[in-house]
Image (tube, grey):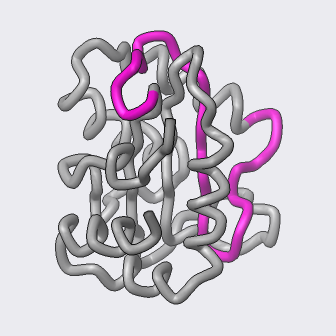
Amino acid sequence: MEILLTDIFDPRSIKLNLESASKEEAFAELIGAVASLHPELDPAEVLAAIVARENKMSTGIAPGVAIPHAICKGAGDKSAGIIGAIGISKAGIEYDALDGKPVHAIFMLIIGERANHLRALNQICALAQSEGFALIRNAKTPRDVQAVLAELS
């Protein structure tokens, strides 16, 4: 099954002005957006899984970009078993990224137990290194972000 980023990232879970100052706050903010769309998810369980994965190694992997992700019960079979949220921070979030710099875009993936998320990770990494990343960082609406994601698909 082909994975499309437009299926993973619902416009209602794209926050263009993250209010969070820390990565843990950003995780909670993005999980809140996703949980409002997916009541089958347990926000506390998702947060614990994301933090546990993050504690193994920072997911701040590209300049200005982080891809926190974790396998969680309840992600189900929707969107190929992957549910996502995007958060943009104009100021940047201290993230303990591999390059030591703040993160401005967070692509969170909540992965079902049977989902294959490697293609989605690859697509996001390619996006982070493309001109599309600047378009996402400067997007005015979540639909603008969706349009950039659709171009990649």
Locate residue 77, reporting x and y percent: 40, 19
Q: Is residue 25 above or below residue 78?
A: below
23 lies left or right of 16 = right
Give the extent of the magenta segment.
55-80
Residue at horizontal 33 percent and vertical 54 percent from the top: 6
Quadrant housing the C terminus: bottom left
Residue at horizontal 69 percent and vertical 58 percent from the top: 60
Locate residue 117, reporting x and y percent: 61, 37
Residue at horizontal 65 percent and vertical 64 percent from the top: 125
So how many labels did they put on this image? Answer: 0
Locate residue 110, reporting x and y percent: 49, 31
Residue at horizontal 54 percent and vertical 50 percent from the top: 23
Q: Is residue 116 above or below residue 150?
A: above
**Does the magenta run of residues contain 12?**
no
Please identify the quarter of the rendering in which residue 11 is found: bottom left
- From the viewer's side, name the closer residue of 94 and 117: 117
Q: Is residue 29 above or below residue 144?
A: above
